[in-house]
Image (cartoon, rainbow, N blue to C red):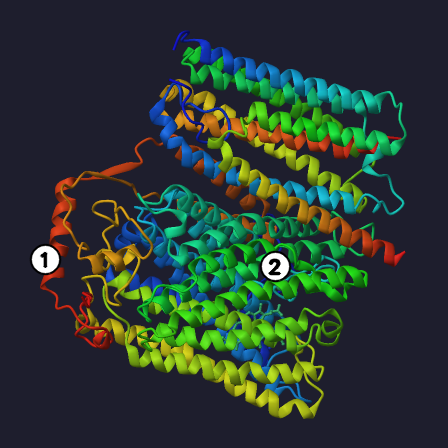
Amino acid sequence: MSAAEAKHAGINLGDSDRETHEKAGSEIFGFWIFLMSDAVIFALLFATYGVMLRGTAGGPSAADEYRILPAFIETLILLTSSFTFGMASVAMKHGRGLRTVLAWMVITLALGLGFLAMELRDFSTMIADGALPSRNGNLSSFFALVPLHGLHVAAGCLWLAVMLVQVPCFGLDKRVKINLLRLGLFWHFLDIVWIAIFSVVYLQGLIR
Amino acid sequence: MNGAISPTILGRLEWLSLPFVRAWQNPTPDELIGAGAATIVVVGMAGTIALITALGKWRYLWRDWFTSVDHKKIGIMYVVLAFVMMSRAVVEGVLMRMQQATAINAPGIVEPDHFAQLFSTHGSIMIFFMAMPFLTGMINYVMPLQIGSRDVAFPLLNSISLWLTGGAAGLMMVSLVIGQFSTGGWSGYPPYTELEFSPDVGPDYWIWAVTLGSIGSTLSGLNFAVTIYKMRCAGMTMMRMPLFCWTTLCTSILMIFAMPPLTVATAMLALDRYLGFHFFTNDLGGNMMNYANLFWLFGHPEVYILILPAFGVYSEVVSTFSSKELYGYRSMVIATMSIAVMSFTVWLHHFFTMGQSASINAAFGIATMAIGVPTGVKIYDWIWTMFMGQVRFTVPMLYSLAFMMTFVLGGLTGIILAFPPLDYLVHNTLFLVAHFHNMLIPGLLYGMLAGYHYWFPKAFGFRLNEKWGQLAFGCWVVGFYLAFMPLYVLGAAGMARRTAEIFEPAFRPWLYVAGIGALILLAALVALFVQLWVSIREREANRVDAGDPWDGRGLEWSIAGPPPEYNFAVLPTVSGGDPFYTSKRNGDAYLPPERYENIEVPKNSVVGPLLGVFSAATGFALVWHMWWLAILGMLAIIITVIARSFIRDTHRIVSATEVERVDLAWRDKLFASRSISREMETTSANQGFAEVAA
Amino acid sequence: MSDPNQGEKDDVRGYVAGYALALALTCAAFAVVRWPSFNRITTLAIVFTLGFAQAIVHFRYFLHITLAKSARDDLWLILFSVLIIVLMVSGSLVILMNLRARMM
Ligand code: HEM
Ligand SMILES: [Cu+2]
């Protein structure tokens, strides 16, 4: 028999757990729609960032504060965390035992927290340099877009933490599995948003 | 008496925030009207609570309604919310008409600032807390039945959406009693709504009420879209769905993609007001034009969110009460989808006068006119549906006919407004106010009222009183023409919208006519309530519990009225469009199922009400800068969500024997009913069993 | 099925491939900005192209959106979202840039 049909975005459980797979179809489609709606929010913040690029009112612009190395390292951390979460999903799908799944999840969580720590350090240097969101429109738009992504990552970390409790608690039952699939979508989606931030905000601002 | 009472606990709340205190200190008519409105809210709340307590109905309400996740109950609660909010907003509309009729070279009855609150609350309520709940409730009730499903895809999320909307509506009501509402209109344009010009709590109330409401709507849209996409019964292909489901699908897609711009706009305004950001301020690189852009990125699709479900209702009603298949089903579907997509391409027509180049204006003007085409297609389809049909002038049909004629007029003035040079002349005048009421009253309100009359017997098992329905209908139509046609004249003559005092005596006769019209509209509202009262009292004579009072066409009519909580004893299988109508003709409707099975239904949940209360409390706290409460509220929301994810016991089983018992009881009633011909459907001979001409 | 672990190996391989491609693209984008060798506009175009390519890599390898028939629904949803986003973002930029230009 060939692989079961894919029913939704993200990794599909079709081959290993038919029952959850059947149910996952609409559950995950709903979450996927939510992500698309969320994508519109990010898109509009990008548009606003573009509109306000020149709204510096004689003050510093966000781009003056960008440093390429931290941004690059943050990108690498997030990419790696996407990969480790992917491994967690594969382990879950193929019944690799709770320990393996949990281990990959813990690594992902650590990477997520590391990303947040680095990002917070970036923001605090900016603020220390007087590049506050209340300084001008340009900085306002930066501080709406990038921290919103950070807030999403923080929410993802909280979600991961909750799942770290639920996996030992309930084992890999249907709802835990579906929740992990959704969390996976969320995590990978945030990565795509970050790639957009990295290219459109950081790299564009750093091109001289 | 001045200054904050207790800044740490109550934030910036002062004694003077209470309208009673203001009216006591300064008893002008204006303050007394404010205090009177607050009294109505307080007394109304207290009265309701006392009444429920006296009747001992708290348990019943809590168990059977508030915590229910049944799409039918949620739908009904949405519609109740819509009626409550509609009452307030209509009264405010009438009050504004009275003000303008009396304020010709005179101060009138309310102060300008109060007038500004009136149009802001009227507009915000009508759009976010009357129209949206009404259509969301209608969709909730009807759509799952029409596609042959047991519920929506995410029943708990549905309850959460309801309670977020309810909490937001609660904030609107609280603003009458504590503090005041925004004076910035339903669109809340900065820089006027920025701290610099509106330092009071008004815009904050607006921001949080609208934000909560829009989050609720986004979640509803998501829920409906997944339901239609994944939960249709066997054989119900997309092209066999009733048209109402198609309009629901398109409305849901619009909600999913068009609510985010609103959320972004209000959130940025909040950042400006709370954290000193500079998105829309005059100084420091702010760009208030971006607000208009974002707001209307939402605002234009929003009008189609409002109108499409009504189009769906009309399609059902016209086809049922003409006893004919909907003409041009395919063209209707295509038209609905084109409207949905095109509605994202025209937002600029709301700010033609902002100063962008003529070619940009021209592009958006042409796009706007193009939307008229699919709408025109629909009108022709409805006309052809009636042509040679067995048309019955029941109340829903009357609304549909009034809609067709009135809406076309509004569409014509819309084409005028879509033409930028003409728009420059009438922009921001009463011409525009006349235009959008001319679209929204027939295109939304009549549609929802038609649906209300049409599906009421399904939801409650008895018909609404026909006479009072006709009276209410007459008042809505006559009142509408009298109240709004004069505004075209006034607008063309240059009278600006949102004006509290008028200095042009020539406007007097028109304003008087409009005032009389508004009073007739108020009478229409009263007639609706009387109708409900009378119908409940006469319910025994008008029972249609067999479930099919209008010789209906879709699956929703194939079950009892009201349906059991799991809707279908056995999930239906369909083999064509208008499935129930066809199977009645083929003689295979009402076939008893071979066997009954256990049915799994979701358990009630307190999560919805809890989230509604917590988010309203958070909103209130943010309005008044009670930071401790805001933090507490947000924590409570997060904890509730997490705690819920640990609950595994979320479903219960309705046993096959119970299903069988209920189904057989209904069948007994059904076959004991007398089948009636269409001439008798508005008489008490109608027991909900349609005679099928062979 | 010949090898019961074949499915798992394929899945792992997919993630590894995605990760490797994503890393390569990110590093390339980083490199063209860190060690500038083109003019501003070209660099920007390269960065955006690489970013776009990387988004597609993520969709393909991490979110498993493919052209296979069964994944079409998700693909349609993404394409529709992209259409709406392009309309909104490009419209906003055109309108507001035009306004700015006319106010200068
Ligand atoms: C039923 C009777 C109604 C009456 C008597 C009424 C009356 C009014 C009046 C007098 C105004 C203010 C016009 C001005 O700016 O000078 C107004 C504004 C408005 N109305 Fe109504 N209206 C009614 C129904 C509706 C309905 C059904 C809707 C929408 C579903 C609606 C939506 C609005 C909106 C959005 C505004 C603009 C508020 C603003 O300026 O920010 N109205 N209406
Ligand atoms: Cu519009």
Please name the residue shown 77% across and 24% down the image: C29
Q: Position of residue B499 (x, y in %)?
A: 67, 78
Q: Position of residue A201 (x, y in %)?
A: 76, 34
Few, some or many C-alpha atoms within 10 Å of disc 1 (few <14, some 14-19, many ≥20)? few
Q: Position of residue A166 (x, y in %)?
A: 41, 23
Q: Quadrant of ligand 2?
A: bottom right
Mark 2 is on which residue type? Gly
Q: CA distance from mark 1 to mark 2?
A: 51 Å
Of the 4 image quadrants, the one containing the N terminus of chain B is bottom right
In the picture of the structure, the residue carrying the numbered disc 2 is B299
Q: What chain letter is assigned to the residue under label 2? A: B
Secondary element at image label 1: helix
Q: Is residue B199 left or right of B371 when viewed as pictured?
A: right
In the rendered view, would you say C59 is above or below B621? Answer: above
Few, some or many C-alpha atoms within 10 Å of disc 2 (few <14, some 14-19, many ≥20)? many
B400, A23: nearer the viewer: B400
A114, B662: nearer the viewer: B662
In the picture of the structure, the residue carrying the numbered disc 1 is B668
Mark 1 is on which residue type? Asp
